[in-house]
Image: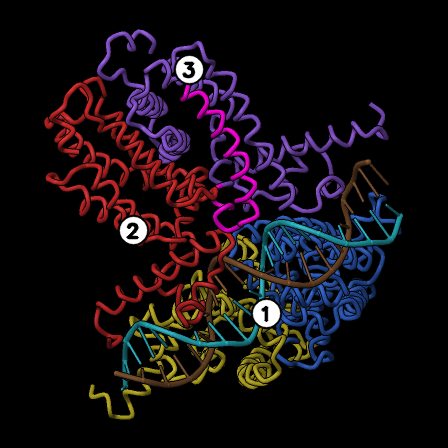
Chain colours: A blue, B yellow, C purple, D red, E cyan, F brown
DNA sequence: TATGAATGAGTGTTCATTCAT
DNA sequence: GATGAATGAACACTCATTCAT
């Protein structure tokens, strides 16, 4: 692509973001160097600074972009007409395929967020967003009577998010992926369990 | 205490571990300096190296010790004769009191673990330990018929651990602690919900 | 003006010199960047290199041109038929108006000259030039008996130049401009003082 | 000197200041690197930062200390009972011996001061100090009737300072030192010239 | 046992300069 | 002529680690 077109700059940024995402994920944000990122792209360190003012800004940008990919997978998986448990499995598999060994970036993000309130705000905003989406989904489930009436939907929403984030933590501590998958599904099932009713079980 | 007795060395190590735990939690492992730790203790940087061979070793030691505190709280809370939901609330409150704003260290640990397989092994071992304890507890619940027969206990165990870890992640992204508490309890309830039975509800 | 004619090139050079003069004066030669200069002109960095081979050459060119402005003010002020003290005051005011807060460039020049013999030569040449002019002026004063016979004119010439340069140094250290003006005039008066004679004082 | 005594730290600072003074004078503040300074001392770069927080602080410290040396020479030269012209010559020679080729630092200082108001304040303060001393000296001269009554002493004080500073500028532009010396003495003489009186000339 | 001065390998960042377009 | 993306050599500053005292 010719360098003069405006898209070029945007694409270059994206390429850097992708590379940095990988590098930060592999080595950790603090240990990875700008040179690592540059080398992964085959450009000079200086070039990075044409697109991002600092390592920190680059990282923040990643933190902003990161949930987008997550959201995309989330939305594309949990359709209203699918059976929840199947969706959950599909979600797990898609996430795994997307991130693979790279799950580390989540913890880089959480770790930084715990010392950086600005970053915390960024994360909060996106989290609120898909929390809302998730809650809509759960309300749908409530109507189909596959979620217990006793459960507070808003809290269950956050519990589900927590469950997923937590699944990543237990993977990172070395639990085999298969076990983690089962834990995820089992936690999910606990919430969507067809209580007291026969017909509901058909929709699981 | 005379400095020559072996207990002294042990005590000194412990004091360093405590200080480092705080400092690493506040600033992050990579950003905190050995000098920060030394200053918090009012000793010289060099002194730290009399007790720990390197910053990394100091951190690993923390990672080994950290779950002990966790385990202690876990065990002291979930007694066999208490109602699970109450125990869960108590657990949350104790954890909060113990760690407060310092939750950050978990993510430091996960973050490092995701780039360091040695550390991963350490974490795995301790996690397995309290997974076992937790599973015993759940089996007890199964007997009291407050956990659904359809749920696989081993998976539910990991789901619970994941749920808790995940609760920390959503706190770190800025969700109010009260909301996080409710999410924790609600997730917990979903698992321990008195399904199909009336009498079980009494034991919640 | 069509861009192909040679005058264009000359005009472009002049515009760059003017902008660079300002920028270097404000930020200091070493701290100012070529980008600063380019931005002040609204052109690209690369464009500067079409007219000047390097930042250093650009600076040297300024050093060559700078005294021209000075000389112009000098010559236009100290006419033979004016009273010296009035001329001195006028000179001060004109210089101030011309350079204002921008006096800094002199020191950039002196500072560089003290590490760069090539630059030193350039400055020497122009200084010799207006030293000669100044000396003519002083000889005129000698004839009018307003300069003491005991003073060596050549040395007094350099003393005057030094006095002026020094006045800039004391302004830069924060002496109020009014005080500096008085110091300049008083130093000037000391040289042109009507000694032993009454009639001379009329011409001051 | 043993490293533990408190004087050690002070001496180390002094050694660094001296080396930095030389290096900054030779290369210019902005071009000189901390490594240059370190190498001149035969220590590591890091060592410098044990004594000075930054290159800028090191420079400011020099700016603060620099006038002390100047003041010392000034005070030791211009005693009340010496003949002014002789003192002036002595002063010139001492300054030359002290600074030699290193006069450049003055311009580094002025140049930085013209972009840095904090530094300006520092310089102002010390300048005020020796301006006061100089003025006392001139008042003495006034009493001895070797300074013309028509001259404002305060302004003459600053004119003298300016004259000296200016002498440095003309040396740096390449005027032979001998010529500069004569210019300095001649400017000085113009101020201390025995006007209207015969007897005063004896004291010059 | 403890200190703290010193080290030196790195790291983020800047910027004069080049060159394909 | 002009652009501006890219380079790469610096450079200020940091910090884990060492070691003489």
Circle 2 chain? D
Magenta span: C110-139
Q: B188 or D117: nearer the eye? A: D117
Circle 1: is it few (<14), some (14-19), or many (20+) Cα within 10 Å? few
Inspect the magenta stretch and tell me whether residue C199 lies in it: no
Question: Which one is nearer the viewer's eye here, C23 or A26?
Answer: C23
Q: Is residue C8 above or below residue B142?
A: above
Q: Which residue matches tag 3?
A: C87
> Within the image, what quadrant is residue B58 found in?
bottom left
Q: In this view, does A156 lie above or below D64?
A: below
Distance Cα–Cα, label 2 vs label 1: 41 Å
Say yes or no: labels 2 and 1 on the same chain. no
Q: What residue would you read off at disc 1?
A: A31
Residue underneath mark 2:
D65
- Residue A61 spot, x, y in % from top left: 67, 53
Instruction: Label the magenta part by its dominant secondary structure.
Output: helix
- x and y percentages locating residue A140 in the rendered image: 76, 52
Question: Which one is closest to the eye, mark 3 or mark 1?
Answer: 3
Magenta span includes C123: yes
Quadrant of the frame with the N terminus of chain D: bottom left
Q: Which of C91 and C154 is in front in this view?
A: C154
User: Judging from the image, what secondary structure is the residue with disc 1 in?
Assistant: loop
Quadrant where the C terminus of chain D is found in the figure: top left
Do discs 3 and 1 share a chain?
Answer: no
**Relative to the observer, which residue lies in front, B92 or B45?**
B45
Kind of element beneath mark 2: helix
> Is residue A132 toward the left or the right of residue C121 in the image?
right
**Is residue D166 among the parts visible in the rendering?**
yes
Q: Mark 3 lies on which chain?
A: C
Q: Is residue B131 above or below residue D112?
A: below
């Amino acid at each position: 692509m010719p360098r003069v077109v405006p898209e070029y700059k945007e694409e270059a940024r994206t390429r850097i973001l992708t590379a940095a995402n990988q590098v930060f994920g592999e080595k950790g944000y603090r240990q990875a160097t700008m040179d690592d990122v540059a080398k992964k792209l085959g450009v000079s360190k200086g070039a990075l600074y044409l697109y991002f003012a600092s390592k920190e800004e680059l990282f923040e940008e990643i933190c902003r972009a990161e949930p987008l990919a997550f959201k995309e997978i989330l939305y594309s998986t949990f359709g209203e007409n699918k059976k929840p448990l199947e969706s959950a499995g599909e979600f797990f598999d898609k996430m795994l395929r997307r991130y693979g060994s790279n799950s580390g970036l989540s913890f880089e993000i959480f770790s930084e967020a715990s010392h950086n309130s600005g970053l915390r705000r960024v994360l909060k905003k996106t989290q609120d967003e898909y929390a809302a989406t998730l809650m809509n989904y759960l309300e749908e489930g409530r109507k189909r009577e596959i979620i217990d009436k006793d459960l507070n939907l808003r809290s269950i929403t956050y519990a589900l998010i927590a469950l997923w984030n937590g699944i990543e933590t237990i993977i990172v501590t070395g639990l085999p992926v298969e076990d983690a998958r089962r834990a995820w599904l089992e936690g999910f099932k606990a919430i969507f369990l067809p209580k007291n009713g026969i017909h509901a079980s058909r929709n699981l």
